Amino acid sequence: MLGMSGEGRKARAPLLESGEYAHAHKTAAPLRCCFWLAGHINVRKCVAGVMLLSVLTIFFYTNYVTAPFTSLVWRDRVPRPLSQCSVLAAQTARDHRSDARLRIDAKVLVIAESLYSRLGRDIAELLVANRIRYKVEVAGKSLPVLTTLDKGRYGVIVFESLSKYANMDKWNRELLDKYCREYSVGVVGFATPGEETLVGAQLKGFPLFMHTNLRLKDATLNPASPVLRLARAGETAWGPLPGDHWTVFRANSSTYEPVAWALRQNDYAPSEERILLATVMQDHGRLDGVQRVLFGAGLQFWLHRLLFLDALSYLSHGQLSLSLDRWILVDIDDIFVGERGTRLHEEDVSAMLASQAALQRLVPGFRFNLGFSAKYYHHGTVLENRGDDALLKNREHFNWFCHMWNHQQPHLYNNVSQLEAEMMLNKQFALEHGIPTNSCYSVSPHHSGVYPVHEPLYEAWRKVWDVKVTSTEEYPHLRPARLRRGFRHRGVMVLPRQTCGLFTHTLLLERYPGGRQRLDRSIQGGELFQTVVNNPINIFMTHMSNYGNDRLALYTFESVVKFLRCWTNVRLASAPPLALADKYFQMRPDELSPLWGNPCDDIRHKRIWSKSKWCDTLPKILIIGPQKTGSTALYTFLSMHPALMPNLPSPTTYEELQFFNNNNYMKGLDWYLNFFPPIEGNSTRIYFEKSATYFDGELVPRRAHALLPNAKIIAILISPSKRAYSWYQHIRSHGDPVANNYTFHAVITANDSAPKPLRDLRNRCLNPGKYSHYLERWAAEFGAHQLLVLDGAQLRSDPAAVMATLQRSLKLAPYRDYSRLLKYDPKKGFFCQAVSNEKTKCLGKSKGRVYPPMEERSAKFLKRYYTPHNTALSKLLVRLGRAVPQWLKDELSTNG
């Protein structure tokens, strides 16, 4: 409950008698009563009477004094929704699309000053937030490849430093300008702060002059600028602009047009005499054929974030344009839940309805979405209980969803029956009080059970409430932002909730110095404003207590919606959760597949991870294949080491779990964990897993990194030609009908007009041998130190040497001498586990088969086919600091 202010203490005075006499009189009255009673009844009865009187006084104070007093203190101080600008008539947002967009990819090239620069990180963060693909290169290096065939790889080139752009070496500059002219690609540049103050300094190579290190105020936009699309002109951002290192531009050519202006902070001249300074300048490209947008500061100023997105849209001819549609849903969790003094009164419910009506005029379809826990109905004061009744009386004006009857965390329930019983109590209450039960939406208290997933929760949801969609801010955690995504599990669509640090606890803001100002900054261009700008679908979590007392939640939403309408051309709307989920996954179908992370890596996730579950035994070593390179042999050798433990076998795929690239991934983390149970009596052993199909799985590297970010990744490579031939013979021996109907040469030389089954077999045979392509994917997710590449030919001929090197790389202890553990079996033709001096334990019958030699024409074809891929592999291994195996040197030799 909020602390009592000075005004509150004064407000209480009329409710009490005032003056010292009154205080003394009230203090002495019970004593006089006792003395009088003492003459008539005994002392024990007098004491009992005083105690009864005290209880009645406390009850009266709690129910009839405290509640009105709280209302008097806070409800009379409810702030009105703010808006520093008028809501103008609707403007038509510009369409930046042109045919030039068809010749460029929707990707941004960022030339950063360093990998750690502040502005570079801000640029990347904004691109990630808007799902814009990008590549970062450090300034000073050669330009990356800019074209693919007849198409440009990048739609916009962004320079973190305008100075670095202007002072590029002649060769790179000419190459870049040629690319920009030929593919109609634009350039964005930022003027970075410098120690030297420049006055009228000319930007090298341009008829443009700059003044630096200025302090500015009162920003406005040029309504005639063709760059504007998301940003809306017509208003002024009053007050000082952030920072004191601003650069402004003055042009000496008609090719330049201001996009934004500001004033110097010490400019106090009359309005008609003030000098507007261009803080963002557009170059129409009339001098050299290259269009540019130049910024006089970074992205700390909220208006620059809008203009940067507009610049990307304009300069890419619409290829990087963002949709202007924004959808908003406001959940009010914990209806009926809360301590006395924090719950809603009748007038609070009336204020909610009034605010909802105001928002509906600005956001079509808007309704507050109420999540209730019915156990706590009528658990407040008299006035608060009337507030509960007012909510039910107006139930048809709101949307409703099930929370939990007991507001208990679902993961604390160990079985489905308990959860179903709890949910049925809530449903029965809803039916008795006319609350609709068909929203197909629910939210888990404290985000428990959604992620990390608690399977009984999903089962109970579907059975009792027919839940098809939920939301959470905990999948995954808010940071890093690029990981926040939706997913679908067990038929339930999980949407990410938006999280704003200031907003989620608005009720407390006025208790902290500057709290109200921080909230207003969040609304006026800050975190809350940017959240809506950067996310097409926004689900906000609020609590019932945010709508009572000071009603800051109502203030916040009305204020941010008005500010969005003043400064942007976004089209705001709302819809029920199920409709929003359909829209979300239409826009982002790639997120239907979940991306499981390790709950034990995040303290907040670990707190809501059921005590009956574990995740500390997840594998720390992953053997990824590819197939037919010796992965099963390596799996067997590692299983012999006392510090290592393989996963439990799968009833369908034996030692391979095939989790990350298979339908098994949709079975969830619980399914995977069951193959790595806690090890009794020896917790120091390390689990490892081997699935040879992981190597070339498109989604596998990202999935594996999300769950096992610190794992060691082991790939085994042999001659890709030999691998392809061995794989063909392997599936032929397993009765593959296509392989049995076509020769190896027919398979590898099949063209694109061949029957589809033959083309598919060709791709499955040849593609895994493009080693560099797939290793690049793994290297992009895992660090070079985590990626171990073994020579499969040496593993076959001298496994003890390979295992010695691998033990050192993995830092395994104790060290095992595999020359004593392995013995060559002449019948099999490879090394097997030594059981005794004479006996060995070898792999199954399918291993070590003798195939007829490959035809010479097939060998020559494959050598030509794999030469460019082997060349790329050699370069990649050198870059990763790995040795180039002898078989690869032989493949690339002219005499090979």
Image (tube, rainbow, N blue to C red):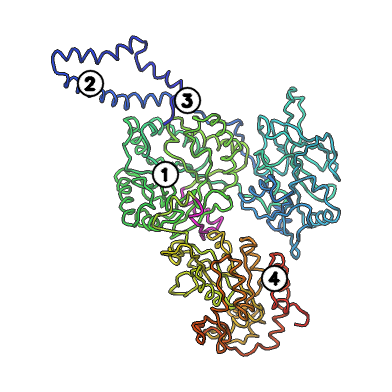
Taking the image as shown, residue 273 lies to the left or right of residue 38, namely: right
Look at discs 3 and 4 and give the one toward the viewer: 4
Give amino acid for label 3: Arg
> Could you say where residue 271 lies in the image, as x and y percent from the top left?
73, 24
Which residue is at the front of the view, 492 or 658? 658
Q: CA distance from mark 3 to mark 2?
A: 38 Å
Which residue is at the front of the view, 694 or 805? 805
Give amino acid for label 2: Val
Marks 1,2: beta carbons within 8 A: no
Residue 883, disc: 4
Residue 399, disc: 1
Circle 3 sits in a helix, a strand or a loop, which is it? Answer: helix
* Residue that carries the numbered disc 3 in the rendered image: 77
Marks 1 and 2, the one that precedes in the sequence: 2
Look at the picture and state if 787 lies above or below 74. Answer: below
Image-quadrant location for residue 74: top left
> Could you say where residue 657 lies in the image, as x and y percent from the top left?
49, 70
Look at the picture and state if 496 lies above or below 520. Answer: below
> Could you say where residue 136 lies in the image, as x and y percent from the top left?
70, 54
Q: Write the start and end of the magenta stretch as one range.
A: 576-602
Give amino acid for label 1: Asn
Residue 527 is at least partly visible in this image: yes
Q: CA distance from mark 4 to mark 1?
A: 63 Å
Magenta stretch, overall SS: helix
